[in-house]
C-alpha cells in the first residue's frame, strides 16, 4: 500500500499545496515561482524516488524567504502525515553526496523530536533569485514539519550551486533510506514503543 499525503498551508504570505507519494518513482510537477528552488526540489524528488507535486504562490516581490521556509514546513508536514505511526520503517538515514567540488553529509532520524544542525559556507548571496541564506531556513522548516533530527554538513566545496544542490540530493537520499520498510521491525524501531 502506498504512503501518500496532501498538505495545504495558507498564510498572508504564501499559499502552498503539496501532494506526496513516498513510495514513488521520482516524478514531479513543481512551481514555486523561484526557478532555482524548483530545480532543487526536482532533484530532491528524483533522487529520493518521491512523487511530488508542489504549487506555491508567495510574496516573491519581497524576497524568497517566506516561500522557501513555508515550503519546507509544508513538505515536512506532508512526510509526517504520509508516514503516520512510522511502523516498520528504518527510521535513520544518512548519505555523503559528492557533486564536483562539493561534498555534503546529511544524517537524519525520524524520531518525532525536532533538532536541526547546519554547517556550511555559502559564498554566493543569491542563486538565481533565491537568497542562499534561505537554504538553511528551508531545511530547518523541513525538519520541524517532519518532526525529525536533521544534520547537514558541508565537508568540501567552493561553488555555492554545487554545495546547495548536493544538500538537497543528500537529504533526499537519507530520507529514502529512513522511510524504507524493514520486515524485521515489529511496530516501530524504538524501545519506547512509539516514535
Image (cartoon, rainbow, N blue to C red):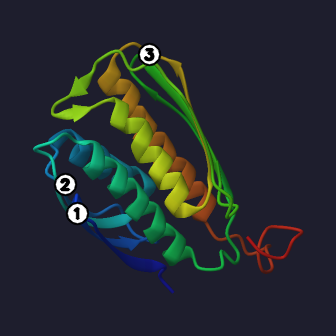
In the picture of the structure, the residue carrying the numbered disc 1 is 12
Percent across and percent down for residue 22 are: 46, 70
Q: Earlier in the sequence, mark 2 or mark 1?
A: 1
What percent of the width, then of the height, locates residue 52? 31, 65
- Of residues 154 and 43, the one nearer the viewer is 154
At 56% from the left and 49% from the top, the residue drawn is 174
Whether 159 is drawn above or below 28: the answer is above
Q: Are marks 2 and 1 in contact (CB under 8 Å)?
A: no
Q: Nearer the viewer, residue 181 or 132?
A: 132
Q: Secondary structure at mark 3?
A: loop
For label 2, the residue is 32
Residue sitting at x 42%, y 33%: 166
Q: Image check: 80 left or right of 194?
A: left
Q: Which residue is mark 3?
A: 157
Q: Could you say where residue 72 lies in the image, as x and y percent from the top left?
A: 39, 54
Is 41 positioned to the left or the right of 110 in the image? left
x%, y% of residue 156?
51, 16
Q: Secondary structure at mark 2?
A: loop
Residue that sits furthest to the front in the current view: 12
Q: Pointer 2 and pointer 3: residues touching (CB < 8 Å)?
A: no
Query: Which mark is nearer the camera, 3 or 1?
Result: 1
Could you tell which of marks 3 and 1 lies nearer the N-terminus? 1
Amino acid at each position: 500500500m502506498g504512503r501518500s499525503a496532501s498538505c495545504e498551508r495558507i498564510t498572508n504570505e504564501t499559499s502552498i499545496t503539496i501532494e506526496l507519494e513516498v513510495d514513488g518513482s521520482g516524478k514531479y510537477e513543481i512551481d514555486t515561482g523561484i526557478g532555482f528552488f524548483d530545480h532543487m526540489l526536482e532533484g530532491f524528488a528524483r533522487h529520493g524516488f518521491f512523487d511530488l507535486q508542489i504549487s506555491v504562490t508567495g510574496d516573491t516581490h519581497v524576497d524568497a524567504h517566506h516561500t522557501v521556509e513555508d515550503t519546507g514546513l509544508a513538505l515536512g508536514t506532508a512526510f509526517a502525515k504520509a508516514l503516520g505511526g512510522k511502523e516498520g520503517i528504518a527510521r535513520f538515514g544518512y548519505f555523503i553526496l559528492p557533486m564536483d567540488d562539493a561534498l555534503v553529509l546529511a544524517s537524519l532520524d525520524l524520531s518525532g523530536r525536532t533538532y536541526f544542525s547546519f554547517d556550511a559556507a555559502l559564498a554566493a548571496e543569491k542563486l538565481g533569485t533565491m537568497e542562499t541564506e534561505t537554504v538553511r531556513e528551508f531545511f530547518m522548516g523541513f525538519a520541524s514539519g517532519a518532526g525529525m533530527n536533521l544534520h547537514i554538513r558541508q565537508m568540501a566545496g567552493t561553488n555555492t550551486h554545487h554545495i546547495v544542490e548536493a544538500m538537497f540530493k543528500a537529504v533526499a537520499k537519507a530520507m529514502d533510506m529512513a522511510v524504507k520498510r524493514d520486515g524485521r521491525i515489529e511496530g516501530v524501531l524504538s524501545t519506547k514503543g512509539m516514535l
